Image: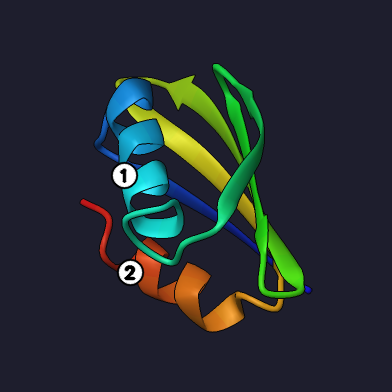
Amino acid sequence: MLTLEIKTKLSLEDAVQQLKKFFGKGGMGLEITEETPQCLKFEGGGGHVTATLCPEEGKTRMTLVTQEWDYQVKKFASGLA
């Protein structure tokens, strides 16, 4: 299991869209099993990715918790602005 906390200049809405694009149907193909304005949970391939988002001083703090998708979560995090 891997937990990463990152800050991005993206707005909360843009961060959610990037998560969906990367991990969802058009990207890794994971299924969204839970969605609230500040939390997304993706499942598939025997694992999961959970993203918790919090607006913070003009940025968005994102906590990513994963099992079986460590490499992809690190790749996603390294590509954020």
Image quadrant for the N terminus?
Answer: bottom right
The reply to whether callout 1 and callout 2 are in contact (CB within 8 Å) is: no
Residue shown at the point (59%, 50%) measured from the top left: 31
Mark 2 lies on a secondary structure that is helix
Q: Which mark is residue 78?
A: 2
Residue 32, percent from left and from top: 59, 42
Tell me which label, 1 or 2, sits earlier in the chain. 1
Identify the amino acid type marked 2. Answer: Ser
| Residue 38 as seen in the image, left or right of residue 48 | left
Residue at point 60%, 53% (across, down): 64
Residue 50: x %, y % from top left? 67, 48
Q: Residue at x 26, y 34 (%)?
A: 10
19 to 57, vertically: above or below: below
* Kind of residue at disc 1: Gln
Q: Is residue 13 left or right of residue 40?
A: left
Which residue is labeled 1 in the image?
18
Residue ranking furthest to the left: 81
Residue that appears at 76% across and 74% down: 46
Q: Nearer the viewer, residue 25 or 8?
A: 25
The nearer-to-camera label among 1 and 2 is 1
